[in-house]
């Protein structure tokens, strides 16, 4: 009967409901948190895509005056990359059951992200002190919009980061901890990619 049931099964009716685990030979549901994260990333992609299109169009107009290239932006980009790498290491360690080591990497990633945000704040203050106000030129306005909107999303990530640390401290469920760190890693990788694209757009335009 099992063989007959398998032969008559219609797998196309189950698409999107389960994820097949080939190694175990079973099906496991996709975590709701991961589905929610993907929807969030899709919406963020739309927002930053529209901003990038507007930026690319606006810089072709004659009143566009590019800002000076803040050298700290290069350093900040490297800091954000290191934070993303630390979270990836935390994810791998959690999958291996090394929860304590994973927590240490998670803390490092959070510290690097905070350092990145402080650097962005310092750059904005320096530009404002030099007279590059948002209302003075469209290039200035776009710079502040891009950097602070991205920083806002990173700050939201830090809220999830804090909850992840609290989850590690309170729970001994290795699978849930691994999932939590995986979601954090995906979010950080995504925001680093977004920042890299925006950074290249601002520096080389």
Image (tube, rainbow, N blue to C red):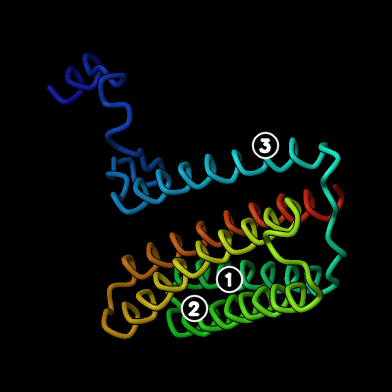
To which residue does mark 3 refer?
53
The quadrant in which residue 199 appears is bottom right
Asked if 77 appears above or below 38 in the picture, the reply is below
To which residue does mark 2 refer?
102
Q: CA distance from mark 1 to mark 3?
A: 34 Å
Q: Give percent across and percent down for residue 172.
A: 28, 79
Q: Give percent across and percent down for residue 173.
A: 28, 73
Q: Nearer the viewer, mark 1 or mark 3?
A: 3
- Tell whether label 2 touches label 1 (CB within 8 Å): yes
Label 1 element class:
helix
Q: Residues within 10 Å of mark 3 (few under 14, many from 20)?
A: few
The quarter of the picture where the N terminus appears is top left
Count numbered badges in the picture: 3
The quadrant in which residue 10 appears is top left
Q: Residues within 10 Å of mark 2 (few under 14, many from 20)?
A: many
* Farthest left residue in view: 1
Disc marking residue 47: none
- Give the side of residue 40 with respect to residue 192, left or right: left
First-in-chain label (1 vs 2): 1
Asked if 1 appears above or below 53 in the picture, the reply is above
To which residue does mark 1 refer?
89
- Give the side of residue 110 with respect to residue 156, left or right: right
Label 2 element class:
helix
Which residue is rendered at x = 21% and y = 14% of the image? 8
Which residue is rendered at x = 72% and y = 50% of the image? 197
Front-most of 156 and 144?
A: 144
């Amino acid at each position: 009967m099992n063989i007959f049931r398998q032969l008559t099964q219609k797998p196309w009716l189950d698409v999107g409901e389960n994820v097949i685990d080939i190694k175990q030979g079973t099906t496991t549901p996709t975590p709701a948190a991961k589905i929610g994260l993907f929807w969030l990333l899709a919406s963020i992609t739309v927002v930053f895509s529209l901003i990038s299109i507007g930026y690319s169009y606006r810089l072709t107009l004659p009143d566009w005056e590019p800002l000076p290239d803040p050298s700290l932006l290069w350093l900040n980009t490297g800091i954000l990359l290191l934070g993303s790498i630390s979270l990836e290491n935390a994810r791998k360690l959690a999958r291996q059951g090394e929860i304590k080591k994973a927590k240490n990497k998670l803390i490092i990633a959070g510290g690097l992200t905070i350092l990145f945000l402080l650097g962005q704040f310092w750059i904005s203050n320096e530009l404002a002190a030099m007279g590059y106000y948002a209302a003075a030129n469209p290039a200035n306005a776009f710079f502040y919009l891009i950097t602070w909107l991205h920083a806002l999303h990173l700050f939201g990530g830090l809220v999830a980061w804090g909850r992840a640390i609290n989850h590690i401290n309170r729970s001994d469920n290795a699978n849930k901890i691994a999932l939590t760190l995986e979601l954090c890693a995906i979010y950080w990788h995504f925001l680093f990619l977004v920042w890299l694209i925006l950074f290249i757009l601002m520096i080389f335009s």
